[in-house]
Every structure is written in structure tokens, then in C-alpha cells.
Amino acid sequence: MAIKPKDMAKMVDHTILHPKSTALDVKKTCDEAKEYDFASVCVNPCFVPLAAKLLENSSVKVCTVIGFPLGATTSETKAYETKDAIRNGAQEIDMVANISAIKSHSWDVVREDIKAVVDATKIAGVTKDIITKVIIETCYLDDEEIEKVCQICKKAGADFIKTSTGFGPEGADTEDVSLIRKNVGRSIGVKAFGGISTFEEALDMLDAGANRIGSTEGVSIVTGDDEE
């Protein structure tokens, strides 16, 4: 049976990461997430306490970003951010990998950076089931680099690999999604993010191997309405 727009809701992270986003914008996004029963709302760390309060007693999780958007903070800083976010109510962590280290092929640095956040989720979320997603910013990477970092994420215990921050020159690409899925198999998730605003675009990502979609246009995706 063909998937319908409304069937995609629990695969969507309804996202609000714009620098100019206000508390009112976050409230609107959380209200929409509850109405359409999205998987999560993804907010900047400063809005985690607000989102946790607004989403309390709902099935929608609170997701936040770590080391965002460049991935250039230290591993220790990312670990602290992660623990702080979980204490504030975050249930899903989308960390940006050290892109510079990936491009430099400093694989031990990449490995330890990701492991620092995965370990932090286990410490801070000891009584909770915290999901960790690693953003690898595929638009900057070649196929060999994507393949290598996929293996590192898998061994480090990440739950998902996420294509993009949405702040790079390009967002999600079906070829990159397929490549990630090929390299991780079905053992961990693949989240496509960046430039996905319609049901058809989201469906293309699912067909390529994604099982989570991040978008600022979650409502348009699940209603099949491409118009703003």
C-alpha cells in the first residue's frame, strides 16, 4: 500500500533552528507538532526547556542540536552541551561531527568526538532512552569520506546519521542518503535534512533509504500541501 502524507508524521522532526526564531515561533512549532503528531520538535539548546514544557504529556519528543552548525567546538564542549540539554528535557540529540577532522582524515579525532557525545547521552540520560544522531554535512564530503564516517558512527553507538545541518551550501541528496544506508545497513537510522519541503521530496528520501525526515515544513509534508 502506498504511503500517504499523513502516514509520514512519525518520521518527521518538525524543525525550528533559524537564528531569528522567537519563543512565540517555538510555541507555534510545538503546537503544530502536537496537532500532527510528529516524531519530535528540533530546537536550538536555549529553547529546550520551553519545548519540554510545551510538549509535556504528548508523544512528541524534544530534539536539540549540539556543536551546531559547524561542528567546530571541542569534544568536551559538545559533551557538556549534551548533558545540559538532557537535564533541560531533551530526548534526542543531533550533534554535528567535527567536519574539519573528517576532511583532514583525522579519524581518531572524529571517533573520539562522536563517542564523547554518545557517552554523554548514556551518563545524563541513564534513566531515559536518549537518541543520538550524528550530522556529517554530506555536501562537504566525498564518497570515501562518507563511507568512513558511517562506519565510525556505527561503531561509536550512534542511533542515526543525519545528512546536513541546513546551514551548508546544499542539503539532503538522495544519492548521499542511499550511500549512507548502504554503509550502515539496517542497524541504525538515516535522517535526511535540508531543503525538504514537500511530501514528494520527503518520499524520495524515504525511497533512498531514510527513515527520519527533518524539515521546517513538516505541516506541508504531512498534509500534501506544497503551498505556504
Image (cartoon, helix red, strand yellow):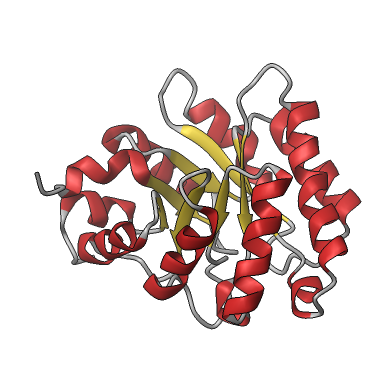
Across and down, in percent, residue 193 comes to 46, 62
Q: Nearer the viewer, residue 190 or 62?
A: 190
- Give residue 7's quadrant in the image: top left
Report if residue 178 is visible in the image.
yes
On screen, 117 above or below 136?
Answer: above
Across and down, in percent, residue 146 comes to 61, 71
Residue at 83% x, 46% y is: 116
Residue at 47% x, 61% y is: 182
Which quadrant is the C terminus positioned in?
Answer: bottom left
On screen, 120 above or below 140?
Answer: above
| Number of marks in picture | 0
Across and down, in percent, residue 113 comes to 82, 55
- Give residue 122's quadrant in the image: top right
Report if residue 32 is visible in the image.
no
Residue at 19% x, 65% y is: 226
Across and down, in percent, residue 191 comes to 47, 54
On screen, 164 above or below 112?
Answer: below
| Drawn side of residue 224 relative to residue 85, left or right | left
On screen, 11 above or below 17?
Answer: above
| Drawn side of residue 165 relative to residue 60, left or right | right
Which quadrant is the N terminus positioned in?
Answer: top left
| Drawn side of residue 203 relative to residue 128, left or right | left
Q: Nearer the viewer, residue 75 or 17?
A: 75
| Drawn side of residue 167 relative to residue 36, left or right | right
Outermost residue, left side: 1
